[in-house]
Amino acid sequence: MLFATLVAAVLHASWNAVAHWIPDKTASLTIVNLGGLLCAVPLVSVAAAPDAASWPYLAASTVLHVAYNCLLMTSYRLGDLSQTYPLARGTSPLVVTLLAAALLGETPRHGQIAGVLLISAGLACLVFWGHRTHPSRPAAVGAAVATGLMIAAYTTVDGAGVRLAGSTLGYIAWLMMLEQTAIPAAAFAWRGRKLWYEIRPVWHIGIAGGAMSVAAYGLVLWAQTRSALADVAALRESSIIVGALLGTFLFKERFGAARVLATCAVAVGIAVMYLV
């Protein structure tokens, strides 16, 4: 479970870097989702259909994922990857821990609580301490926090839904099919043929990003069937380290001492979650 979740973290940061790199965020959102859709179609054809009990969760998760994608692209339009990505991801673990305890009866261990707090504190430092000399745009921060709340919501919904599905692969496949059909359909209805001209130069990169997105969340859902939601949610946020490195080397964003210390906090938090 640990290895799968960490691989998912790397893939997740990578597809977010792709989405951030494409200048037109509507085109970015559309092509990444089309890439995910191409991966979902064969999965739906071979996977067993999820049980009826999981379909309300699939419907709710689809709505939450659409909102998440829209908020994510808004935050990327307004702020830097190294600012908005950690803030969005850092908001999620604490909220997931609370929701899992309140709704699913998962009582957090003392070590789990300490680990989640350390990870979240490290991620928060990556945003606020590293930007003391470069004040954050309130709109970018607001969009990133809202994105984090959407992450927490769909993580909790999917954690419950996939356990009722009877087929982990079937749940993943249908979730991706539903989610990644809705966004391109809405985008083309809004922008029409003009959207094709924005997509054509970057279609191959966007498709690769979509494939990484499907693989990343598929691994997370699989991990959620074998471990507590809060553990998986916190571990996957180690993707912020990869995101910070990508922001540094690809987008020339600053990675100073504050972010090194925050990275250490995240690593210690992961160790505490598993050893205490």
Image: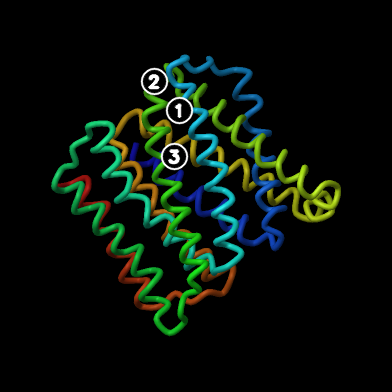
Q: Which mark is residue 57?
A: 1
On the picture, is 160 further left or further right than 121?
right
Crowdedness near tag 2: few (<14), some (14–19) or many (≥20) residues, C-alpha within 10 Å:
some
Closest to the observer: 119 or 73? 73
- Viewer-side label of 2, 1: 1
43 w.r.t. 76: above or below: above
Secondary element under disc 3, as helix, strand or loop, is helix
Q: Residue furthest bottom?
A: 133
**Dot 2 corresponds to which residue?**
164
On the picture, is 197 further left or further right than 40?
right
Residue drawn at (59%, 51%) of the image? 70
Secondary element under disc 2, as helix, strand or loop, is helix
Three-letter code, disc 2: Leu
Q: Position of residue 88 (x, y in %)?
A: 44, 57
Three-letter code, disc 1: Tyr
Q: Earlier in the sequence, mark 3 or mark 2?
A: 3
Mark 3 vs mark 2, CA separation in Å: 15 Å
Q: Which mark is residue 154?
A: 3
Secondary element under disc 1, as helix, strand or loop, is helix
Crowdedness near tag 1: few (<14), some (14–19) or many (≥20) residues, C-alpha within 10 Å:
many
Residue drawn at (34%, 69%) of the image? 125
42 w.r.t. 200: above or below: above
Three-letter code, disc 3: Tyr
Closest to the observer: 226 or 62? 62
Q: Position of residue 9 (x, y in %)?
A: 44, 49
Q: Which mark is residue 256?
A: none
**On the rendered image, what quadrant is the N terminus found in?**
top left
Q: Position of residue 273 (x, y in %)?
A: 22, 48
Mark 3 vs mark 1, CA separation in Å: 9 Å
Q: Position of residue 160 (x, y in %)?
A: 37, 29
Callout 2–callout 1 Cβ contact below 8 Å: yes
Closest to the observer: 44 or 108? 108
